[in-house]
Amino acid sequence: MTRAALSEFELIARYLSRPTGGERIDVAVGNGDDCAVLTPTPGHQIAISVDTSVSDVHFPHDAPPAAIGHRALAVALSDLAAMGARARWCCMALTLPAVDEDWVEAFAEGFQTLALRSGCAWIGGDVTRGQLAVSVTVHGELPAGSALKRSGAKPGDVIAVTGYPGRAAAGLERWQQGERDETHPLLAAYLRPEPRLAAGEALRGLAHAAIDISDGLVADLRHLMTASGVAARLEIESLPLATPLRATLETETVRRLALGGGDDYELLLTLNESDLPEAQRRLAALHLPLTAVGRVVEGDGIHGLSPTDLAHDGWDHFPEVAS
């Protein structure tokens, strides 16, 4: 028997207004009203970011719906991680070409599972018709004055990166080549990235500047250096390369993916060399490696890379086109 099509409001009520897991004293009014009403922690500041994911731009339209839900929230939460903020609340607006209840249910499950695991209350949202897209607004908290910003890098700082950049880009290439095993570590890195929230909090008080790698290591390092008014010298041989990359791909391909692939959502940061061991110790407790890959220097630009390496300049939605 064919199920009757749900209206917009039935769709929201059934799948997109799920409880966030028990009563939360920080949510005075949650899903179901015109606005959520929140109670911030005294002495803290609020960090807010919004991210939009569009079908066949940020994720394949035929990706598993649970993975699309997870990914849409993960990339937004990653911005909180880069600031050292603790995730508290999120809203989501979903644009659908048509109602497919099974798809929406799986999508919502992927979104909700990550929200619960991240301690992030899902407090509201919207649904409309159009090209498949997901917009997520996240709210986080951090002690007043402790935010990690892009503008704090200083000459002499060590540049370090969490995890293994390049895995997600390799996963996307595998998907495009027909790989559909979601358990493959490279495919999983692309479909279900892990926002480094705990790492961001652990790095407060140590990191001088930070950014998450969404557009590619070279591109995001350039953003960091520009905001700080300094330059970077990368040590290309120090790049941490995941075993699945080194085992299956040519060296030049691995470097291309690690430097320009994007979608990793690892943290790229600068800190005093003397603080590097403590930062590595804190992240080791989270089972996350932190690798020094260069140093901040006077000047501008990124040094230590070949012209080929520098060409791996990451993702741009509106690249300049020669006339």
Image (cartoon, rainbow, N blue to C red):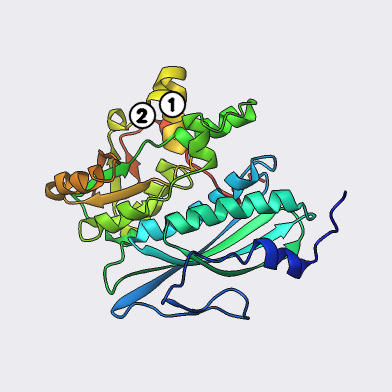
Give, as a three-letter code, the residue at label 2: Leu
The residue at the point 61 percent across, 55 percent down is 108
Q: How many marks?
A: 2
The residue at the point 64 percent across, 41 percent down is 64
Looking at the image, can residue 293 be seen?
A: yes
- Could you say which disc has been placed on residue 241 in the image? 2
Residue 60: horizontal and vertical position, in percent?
65, 41
- Could you say which disc has been placed on residue 254 in the image? 1
128 relative to 2 in the view: left or right = left
Residue 303 occupies which quadrant of the picture?
top left
At numbered mark 2, what does the secondary structure look like: helix, strand or loop? loop
Residue 37: horizontal and vertical position, in percent?
50, 81
At numbered mark 1, what does the secondary structure look like: helix, strand or loop? helix
Mark 1 surroundings: few (<14), some (14-19) or many (≥20) residues within 10 A: many
Looking at the image, can residue 229 be seen?
A: no
Query: In 3D space, how far apart are the residues under numbered discs 1 and 2 (Cα atoms)?
Result: 8 Å
